[in-house]
Image: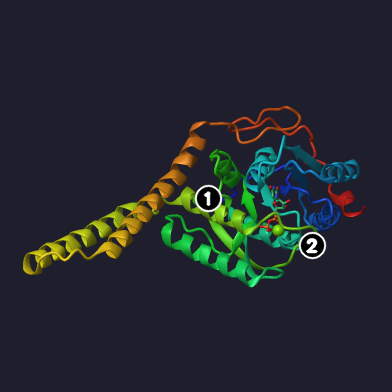
Amino acid sequence: MMRESMRTHDTRRSLSVVVPVYNEMEVLPEFHRRVCAVLATLDMNSQIIYVNDGSTDRTLEVIHELDARQAQVQLVDLSRNFGKEIALTAGLDHADSDAVIVIDADLQDPPELIPELVSHWLDGYDVVYAKRTQRDGEGVVKRATAFLFYRLMQKISRVAIPEDTGDFRLLSRRAVDAIKQLREQHRFMKGLFAWIGYPQKAVPYRRAGRFAGTTKWNYWKLWNFALEGITSFTGEPLKVATYAGLTSALVALTYGAYFAVRTLLYGNPVPGYPSLVVIILFLGGVQLLSIGIIGEYLARLFDESKKRPLYFLKSGRHAAPFRLAAPAVAAAAEPHEECAER
Ligand code: UDP
Ligand code: MG
């Protein structure tokens, strides 16, 4: 069906697994073992790309230890912590395989699902995403806020962003090439994955708790993530000011007319101090809120207008805006069997 975009290396297809890692030294060996075990069952040239997102623990050494044993491990070392979205983008920039799997290092995304993602890709889907049916190890509040966020996004955004979906997915070559052209600084990845279009397919799975280590998320970060999602994909909140202003103006007009009539009929006994304070506070609040919303968009516009590169690599190589040179480690051609035993 949509096979024209897939390149083949000696009749076999190639697969890259992109893993953003930030302080994951406890999980990484186990993660690597499980991914290798899964890749060994696939009849494909495979490669794992670890993107070290400025880890401050021994993560880099752990990756190098993996590297020494397995030739098909590639390391992309960022110059500092850029955040998961950009780490992921750096990984996609360095993958040159027919399909790319994006997966978290903390084993919340089961690597055992990869063969199923691959099989749907072989059926012709460009984006095969894993959809959570259950979230173990996450509290009621986190689940409820996640639920609300996805429903809200669904309502106000023009692109249908699949709910209960993380970044764990498979992307075909043409989907990766499409994503690589989106160089915005504020990267709401699951929105971008949906935005590119192409045939997309959901695969349900049960999300596990973290294997080890702690999540890098807290509620303040989650709130900002939600803001990122909303401001990246819809301008609806900007309309709030218009309608709030219109409503309060209408209320003020009606109220004014009422006072005019009442003064004409009964004179003016000087009441109304509380109502005055309420009105002033209300209008002040609406105005500040509206300025705040405009500010959220303006700040993002400011960031985008600088047109800075998304990231730098430790090696000093500059991240080109669209296409990078082929990765230094020519690993895709290595057989993956030896990966299984370690
Ligand atoms: N991560 C990253 N940079 C960061 C934060 C996280 O590369 O600044 C990676 C992290 O190592 C993991 C993935 O992104 O592989 C998901 O992170 P985490 O488990 O903390 O997020 P959650 O699962 O709670 O959404
Ligand atoms: Mg996690």
- Whole-percent x, y for residue 342 in the image: 92, 52
Residue with the most extreme right position: 342
Which residue position holds label 1?
Answer: 228
Badge 2 marks a residue whose secondary structure is loop
Which of the 4 image quadrants contains residue 75? top right
Residue 21 x %, y %: 75, 48
Q: Nearer the viewer, residue 261 or 91?
A: 261
Picture disc at residue 36: none
Residue drawn where x is 63% and y is 60% of the image: 120
Horizontally, residue 61 falls left or right of residue 275, namely right
Label 2 environment density (alpha carbons within 10 Å; few <14, some 14–19, many ≥20): some
Residue at x 56%, y 51% (from the top left corner): 193
Please state which amino acid type lies under the numbered disc 1: Glu
| Crowd class of label 1 (few under 14; some 14 to 19; many from 20; radius 10 Å) | some
In this rendering, the answer to whether 223 lies above or below 60 is below
Q: Nearer the viewer, residue 55 or 322?
A: 55
**Residue at the spot of label 2:** 211
Q: Secondary structure at mark 1?
A: helix
Residue 248 lies, in percent from the top left, at 27, 59
